[in-house]
Image: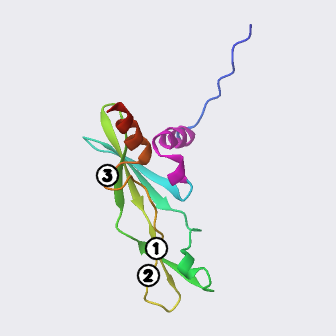
Amino acid sequence: MSQPTKFQKGDSELYRIVSKMMVPAFILVDFSISDVVENKDNLQIELREKTDRIPNALASEEHVNLDGFCNPIEVLSHGFSLKPVYLKIYRRRWKASGSKIHHSNQYDFTIKGIKIVPELGIFLNEKD
């Protein structure tokens, strides 16, 4: 009987696979993983909104500019290796050319009133 072939993956591919295990798929639709930071007490995965997610309020504008990021949103995702994993989510700010009015997209990342991702909230609720 033949042994299965194991393919060697580079560091960046392993990083991508492991990070995706910790970030819910519904968030990765609109956000990309930009960094992973290991702190003394936790892991933090930073996500940035994809550049093609222009808010509906600006959809009819001919020229739209990126204008930085909103304050990040931090939510608890999972706990691995005895360290909690937090997602630090940056939504982009947009404005029409020549305008000073900023727009950003709104997302539901958490269960209302709890700063944890829905999958973890449902899991914890089932255990009670």
Q: Secondary structure at mark 1?
A: loop
Q: Secondary structure at mark 2?
A: loop
The number of numbered badges drawn on the structure is 3
Q: Which residues are magenta?
A: 12-28
Look at discs 3 and 2 and give the one toward the viewer.
3
Locate the N terminus by quadrant: top right
Residue at point 56% right, 76% down? 56
The residue singled out by tag 3 in the image is 114
Task: Tell me, yes or no, whether the highlighted magenta stretch contains residue 79.
Answer: no
- Describe residue 33's horizontal placement relative to residue 45 as left or right: right
| Crowd band around label 1 with a 10 angstrom C-alpha radius: few (<14), some (14–19), many (20+) | some
Locate the C terminus by quadrant: top left
Can you give x and y, in whole percent of width and height, for residue 15 in the image? Answer: 50, 41
Can you give x and y, in whole percent of width and height, for residue 59 in the image? Answer: 60, 79
The residue singled out by tag 1 in the image is 104
Q: Earlier along the polypeptide chain: callout 3 or callout 2?
A: 2
Q: Secondary structure at mark 3?
A: loop
**Depth check, front residue: 58 or 47:** 58
The residue singled out by tag 2 in the image is 102
Q: Amino acid at mark 3?
A: Ile
Quadrant of the image occupied by residue 62: bottom right
Does residue 49 lie above or below 76 as drawn? below
CA gap between label 3 and label 1 equals: 22 Å
